[in-house]
Amino acid sequence: MRVEDLGGYKLVVRRDVRLRKGVLVQGLPGIGLVGKIAVDYIIANLHLPLFAELFGPGLLLPVGNAGVFVDGSGVLRLPSYKFYLLERDSGDVVFLTSEVQPVSWGQHDVAERVLDYFVRIGGREVIGVCGTSSESEEIEVYYALAGDLDEKRFEALNLKKSSGGTITGACGLLPALAAMRGLSGYVIMGSTNTSEPNPAAAREVIVALSKLLGIEVNLEDLDRMIKEVRSREEIAKKLLEQMERRPEPSLPSWYV
């Protein structure tokens, strides 16, 4: 293990890698935690090894304060970007996740340092995965491209082209900056009608990623999680309906 200085950021390299046709998939906290759930699930399901971590001033606690996490064993953990590796003969895939988004003033700095490292080890393509707000309960998967890419690749998978708007945070920024360096870049977004964690939307993103990257992910554990979430939502809904039907106590006749 060694520590590299990247212009005020620290890169802890646990293992030197040289990517073959390297692809990076980034999933961070965001709307419905769609991107983070998707990437974290793939990492856990495929038992991918951690090979590098990035630390620095743009990676603070979720509320924007400087500080550390304390894990269940009482160990201090700095907020960091974590890089996991899937090695394949057809091309290697780096999965990037974190507990945090970079603070707004650090978004560009963090993204550029990620790209510096990714390009150095053989990166060619960057994919951002995240959620996108929708009023409909029906989950759709959208794409948005950075640069000149063949849309037929996405349309063949029944993905919908984003019709406009903005993508805040690192999800869209990293692929866009990657395209400025001559890399391929695009975003895959799962629609969600809630700000609460949405594993069902993350599932659809995983399905799309699996087809785009040619990987196999067992979804049984995620399906159980989705079922449990829906069960809790149904219980909460019934309790709320019961409370709404309960008659309010009337005021005494002498009350004025």
Image (spheres, rainbow, N blue to C red):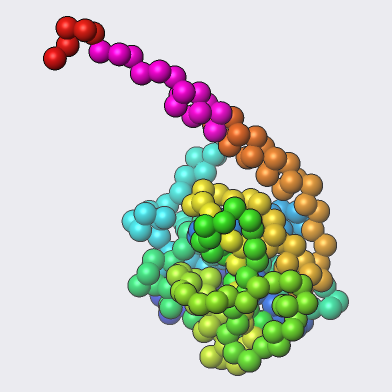
Residue farthest toward the front in the current orientation of the protein: 253
Rendered location of residue 141, percent (x, y): 65, 66
Look at the picture and state if 53 lies above or below 91.
Answer: above
**181 in the magenta segment:** no
Q: Please, what is the dominant secondary structure of the magenta stretch?
A: helix
At 75% from the left and 62% from the top, the residue drawn is 207
Q: Which residues are magenta?
A: 237-251
Rendered location of residue 24, percent (x, y): 65, 74
Which image quadrant is residue 206 in? bottom right
At 54% from the left and 64% from the top, the residue drawn is 132
Point out the image quarter for the C terminus: top left
Which residue occupies the foreground of this view, 39 or 92? 39
Which residue occupies the foreground of this view, 20 or 195? 195
Point out the image quarter for the N terminus: bottom right
Does residue 61 appear anywhere in the picture?
A: yes
Rendered location of residue 232, percent (x, y): 60, 34
At 58% from the left and 75% from the top, the residue drawn is 162
Does residue 5 appear anywhere in the picture?
A: no
Which residue occupies the foreground of this view, 173 or 8? 173
